[in-house]
Amino acid sequence: MANFSYTIYILLVPLLIFAIVGIWGGKWKPIISGLIGTFGIAFILVLSYYAAYQYFFVVNHVGHYKQIVAMNFLWLPFNKILNVHMGILLDPISAMMLIVVPTISLMSHWYSLGYMKGERGFARYYAFLSLFTFSMLGLVLSTDILQMFIFYELVGVSSYLLIGFYYQRPSAVAAAKKAFIVTRFADFGFLVGILVLVYYTHSFDFMQITDPHSPVFRTILGKAFLGYSVLAWALSLIFVGAAGKSAMFPFHIWLPDAMEGPTPVSALIHAATMVVAGVFTVARIFPIYVHYTPNVLLMIGYVGGFTSLFAALIAMTQFDIKRVLAYSTLSQIGYMMVGLGVSRYGGEEGLGYTAAMFHLFTHAMFKALLFLGAGSIIHAVHSNFMQKMGALRKYMPITHITFLVAALAISGIPPFAGFFSKDKILEAAFMHNRLLFWVEYITAGLTAFYIFRLYFKVFWWTDEPQCDCKPHESPSTMTIPLIILAILSSTVGFIPFNKFVTPDLKAFPVETDWGLVSASVAIGLLGLGFAWFLYRKENDLPDKIVNALGKLYQWTYDKFYIDEIYLFITKKILFNLVARPIAWFDRHIVDGFMVGVAIVTGKTAEKIKGFQSGHLQQYAFVFIASVLIIALTVLYFIGA
Amino acid sequence: MIQGIPITHILVVSVIMFFTGVMGFIIRQNLIAILLSIELMLNAVVMNFLVFNRYLFPHHLQGHFFGLFVIGVAAAEAALAIALILNVYRRFKHIDPDKLNEMKY
Amino acid sequence: MNILNFFIIVPLITVFLILFSKSLKTTRIIAAVGMTIQLLLALWLMYYYLVHYGLKQLHKMIFVSDTVWFPTLNIHYAIGVDGISTAMILLTAIVIFAGVFVSWTMENLHREFFISLIVLATGVFGFFISYDLFTMLLFYELAVIPMYLLIGIWGSGPKEKHAMKLTLMLMAGSALIIAGLLGIYFSTPIVNGHHTFNMLEISKYTLPIKAQRLFFPLTFVGFGVLGALFPFHTWSPDGHASAPTAVSMLHAGVLMKLGTYGVFRVAIYLMPEAAHEMAWIFIILTSISVVYGAFGAIMQKDLKYINAYSSVSHVGMITFGLLMMNATAIDGAILQMISHGIMTALFFALIGMIYGRTHTRNVYEMGGLLRVIPFLGTMYMIAGFASLGLPGFSGFVAELNIFTGAFLHADLFHRVATILVISSIVVTAVYILRFVGIMLMGPIKHEEHLKLKDATWYEKLSTITLVVSMLAIGLYPVWIINTIMGSLKPIMLKILGG
């Protein structure tokens, strides 16, 4: 067995960079911080690739994997049996994430050297990126569900810091706050879920609680609460946490707003890595879901399916290119959830799981590419809105080609990466749940349509850009990562995932259903063609369609008013109907009561101080009168 | 034992004297008058001592001694009180106890 | 001589030397030196305990000494520390150390100020080292009284009124405590012709249940007033708002912990049977405290009020953890005492520094401060993150212990209360981020704020001390958890065994 102890540096190095750059970075020339960050990540990339290579090919036989705990130490002892450990767990999915996270992270670091050049707070930016990389790697390598929760919080905070990077912009501050609070709310569910689960299993350890045959589940089975089994409650609550991070409906509202952050951050965090944390979590606990609570898994599938369709609809109408991409991310994560939701366990039945992980992998590549491409466009045009763009293909050839590759990949056109993974998800859905299959099938068409709408609007549409700017190709620090990602996006689809990542850790053969393949390609091409027809050249057909749709379009454009509902609940109900009355109640009733006691005491003293008048004669009168009264009373009773 | 006068008669007189004193003490607004009232009460008490001694224990003298003792103390007390009253008068130009409230509250 | 005596003697010498000081410069240097010695002592004590007992989860009362002080009533000057009190002493030393540096430029009546401050700290140290109930009470009063002067003279706003409110409410609490302590005293069996105030002795007996039923609520509420137990918490917002910076720090950071420590050491430890019986009432009250304090903070405008309400919420969590009466939750509660102590001290220190610059504590009048005072702004954000329980800081560890411990209860009541309490983490995030957003981020609201100067060396020193302490617990909590756990063992035996 190979020694994996070096994997600790995968976590330590970014943390160290965060500390060093965070504390002293401000004093240096900005570029030094950038280089430290980038080279640090490059170092981690090498280590992680090596670890993944070792895991997949050296330590295990291909197709037969074991979970390996590379290192583990006691972090927080609760009592004799319940302890939180920190450590590194290697299994196919975490090894896969070891490839995804550093790759995308390195690309973002590299790209940011050009994109963020001359920004205030350059060092701070790199410090936060390192913090994020640390947290994300910690999350995927967790050995322990509480470790995962801890890193959930940490990715949440790094995302908060990065979204709020332009902290003087009120919209960025609001977006950062929203992202943190929404995910915090979900984490609340996650924590309660963990506690419910752990109450019965007495173990936080993934080795125990992801093994359905482990004895820790003996007590929880058969326990029920409000008509559902306790395990179903626990796992649903854990899914709430996952849904928060992965921005599933109804927690999706934070993700589009998160686009306020710098674009490379959107690419890294809000498209490729952090948002898949939820998918990763579900995949991590997948054996339990599938063995004990298939209903919850089905619910996850439906939530994913709904989100994907819903987000794709919204994406069709948006004009801010980053928003389109954000909704597209939601939609694609929905796909992954569907993949998990329709999956079963063991052999070919686990296709959905494999496909979801595969899609996670490919999506990371092409979505990062899309975002970085969008960043390159924004860098040139200084606007997020596609009305300001058009005809950019003439000015930005590299960006154009790479963007086209990514767009083809997300639309599921072979031989680009998205095709393979999406097709597998559709296949799995077709096998197990026809309803979800149709939802996802339609979404695939919508996806091709909205992404090519974006593509044509940006790169074609008019003859000249509609902004008063001189678009130019971005510097090489930005284009090289684009090219690398484009190469990855067109090649990673050929990786035989069914050999590496499966729910039962054993490879299974996979057969291609050519009918389904052609159907999925067809719908992709249909969407593409429709977009081509509408947006290839400037015309007024799109506006006519918009007018024809009327209210429906308006609703979609306004994102179905979900944000407004949230705003109503928080501002109107929580702030005005809960917090304000409590503040008032505290000041006036509770404190009023305390003050009231003091006032009553004072008033009483004021009233009775007359008794101590100092008038001798009054005293004498009272004294004698009292003596007389007492004497007479006594006499009356005794004498009688 | 005084022939023909029952003890109750004398006691009635002393009670009247005593309560006249009490009343004077409570309602008079003049320190001298209050002092007089106190004397009146003391005298009533002295009278009682003597009468009880004479009527109940004719062969003992304690009552008489106490009477003398009270008279002596009363004299001292009167002297002291009048000195105080004079000082009060010098300072405030009146001797109304209700208005002597400099030190109150 | 018993080394613990130095915790009393050093501050007293410091106070004595300050008496002869002529200028602020000498005063603050004397104070700083004295408190640094104190901090070193506390660090040494912690180190000593850790190495010998803490890391091995052992329990021992160390440096025990017992001198009869008032024979008629069998009152002893009995001192000694275990892991829990060692940790609390360290907390006190850290906070008072930072507090001295925060008051570095206290011009007005500097001698009197530092003397009162240090006398207060002496009271707190004395409280934590003694295990004779009466001596404890004595030190407790010693800590509460200077508070009145400190707020009444050096405070701001309607300081006399608020000082009065604070002192009177705490005195009312003391009255209950005295009644409770005397009750405990007279319920102990007579040995050698005397009842006893000695906590360790008392813990060996089971007090008659009737006495417990009467005196448990008395001591609990009495100490609870200082621990801001709902509905007796209203002194806290007003008092903190009016107090000068260092005093807010000490008060919220340490003095409130006297209350919770008393709840734990006197009420729950000595009368566990009654505690089991009556816990539900107080669990309801503390759950209310936690959620209510958090919601109360959302709508405040004044930075200090925000923090005071947040303290109500966090300290409520301490009492809540104590009432769960299992080792994990109590462990978390004690950790939360330390963690909240440091965190809130940091908060108040920063509020004082920001107020010293902007001359307003109204959050809505500030904006974009992170840009002009990056150090203080960053520190404020760190404090905020610590407050909302971010992993890596001590608060997270403490809260996790409390939640897990509380959730281990089998019955629905405890667990529903726990979920309610956990929900406060969301509300906490709401108000912290809301005010961080308003105050530190966004555009700068006032022109004159552009000229603000960032932290000076003494401000940096005090804030960094506090942040480092939080990180030391938050990043690797095993050492302190083991220390507390070790000392909890006999206590848990008493609490659960009865």
Image: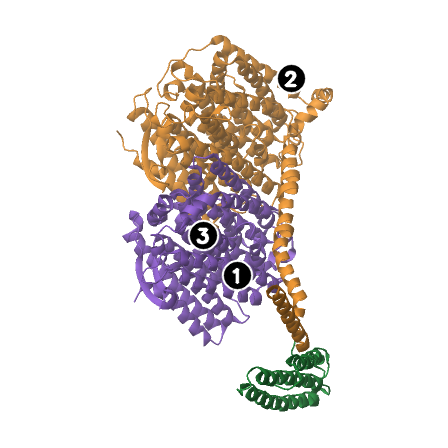
Chain colours: A orange, B green, C purple
Residue that label 1 marks: C171
Residue type at tag 1? Met
Q: Residues within 10 Å of mark 2 (few under 14, many from 20)?
A: few
Instruction: Give the class, few, some or many, for how many residues have Cα within 10 Å of label 3's Cα (few <14, many ≥20).
Output: many
Closer to the camera, A380 or A589? Answer: A589
- Residue A618: image quadrant is bottom right
The kind of residue on which mark 2 rests is: Phe
Residue C263, numbered label: 3
Distance CA(mark 1)–CA(mark 2)? 82 Å
Marks 3,2: beta carbons within 8 A: no
Q: Which residue is mark 2?
A: A533
Write down the chain letter for disc 1.
C
Q: Residue at x 42, y 40 (%)?
A: C405
Q: Nearer the viewer, residue A306 or C484?
A: C484
Residue C182's x, y, as percent?
44, 59
Indicate whether A423 appears above or below A561: above
Residue C111 appears at what percent x and percent y?
49, 72
The residue lying toward the viewer, choosing from C198 and A469, is C198
Q: Is residue B44 visible?
A: yes
Badge 1: residue crowd in 10 Å (few <14, some 14–19, many ≥20): some
Q: Residue at x 59, y 50 (%)?
A: C439
Camera-nearest residue between C284 and C343: C284
